[in-house]
Image: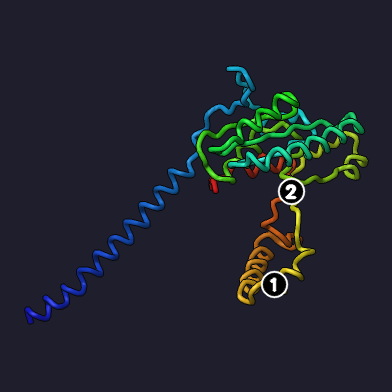
Amino acid sequence: MGFLWSLVALFVAPILVAVFGLVSAIFFEAYRRRINNTHVESPAVFEVPNSSKQVPCTHISDPSEKYISLIIPAYNEELRLPGALEETMNYLQQRAAKDESFSYEVVIIDDGSVDGTKRVALDFVRKYTIDKVRLILLGRNHGKGEAIRKGMLHSRGELLLMLDECHDGDLAASNSSFRISDIPIAAFGSRAHLEEKALATRKWYRNFLMMGFHLVVLLTAGPGIRDTQCGFKMFTRAAARKLFKNIRLKR
């Protein structure tokens, strides 16, 4: 009988140790993620080239000062950033020249880059002034989610844009006192028109998983959103205020 108990203990002990280790790991990871996703907010400032002066950021709770803000998160983008910014600024300047009511800003968030991203961004701040181009430094790498969140929370536009644009002419024409920034609206870009070609090149199991994910989106968010992963997204100030003040995940 003693031998039997010893044999049972020999098998049970490692199992108990493994279970205890697994539970401990789960609790440790949960605690680590909770600490990592706790936002200790310090006053955000914009960097001014060739100066020790720092400009306090506006906050999403403040009234808008520009028609549109373009939010650009950047991590080690020294090579790609100049071309993208030059093209963007050319478009914005041309649009402003045609429409006096069109005002804009570009907010670059350097997410702890270790290359020359900061230098490139500051070159554009010098060229176009801090009123048109602003740079926020996060110090260390937090993740794209945190960079976008920071940019959204500290921009001045009625519309807050990630790479694309929407128009409010029809709505504004119907009511002269209407401000689109007061209505919570989100506009998502879509690559759904490329779906047929993608279906033909993907493995069958990836298509199966994709359709399952689309079903979950349909059930939770309703119809009309065909591409949740596209990087083209725009929010009115009211929508951004509700969303980005409550975001906790950084990546």
Image location (x, y in percent) of residue 232: 73, 50
Q: Residue furthest front?
A: 79
In the image: residue 26, left or right of residue 9: right
In the image: residue 160, left or right of residue 20: right
Mark linked to residue 116: none
Q: What's under tag 1, amino acid-wise? A: Thr
Query: Mark 1 or mark 2, which is nearer to you?
Result: 1
Image location (x, y in percent) of residue 81: 68, 40
Q: Quadrant of residue 65?
A: top right
Q: What's under tag 2, amino acid-wise? A: Ala
- The secondary structure type at the circle numbered 1 is helix
In the image: residue 190, left or right of residue 27: right
Seen from the viewer's position, the closer of residues 34 and 199 is 199
Image location (x, y in percent) of residue 71: 69, 39
What residue lies at 85% left-to-right and 37% top-to-bottom?
178
What residue lies at 37% left-to-right and 57% top-to-bottom?
26
In the image: residue 149, left or right of residue 179: left
Q: CA distance from mark 1 to mark 2?
A: 31 Å
Q: Residues within 10 Å of mark 2 (few under 14, many from 20)?
A: some
Residue 43 drawn above or below residue 116 = above
Quadrant where the N terminus lies? bottom left
Nearer-N-terminus badge (1/2): 2
**Dots 1, 2 in contact, CB < 8 A:** no
Seen from the viewer's position, the closer of residues 131 and 14 is 131
Disc 1 target residue = 201
Q: Residues within 10 Å of mark 1 (few under 14, many from 20)?
A: few
Image location (x, y in percent) of residue 119: 62, 30
Residue 185 drawn above or below residue 212 = above
Disc 2 target residue = 186
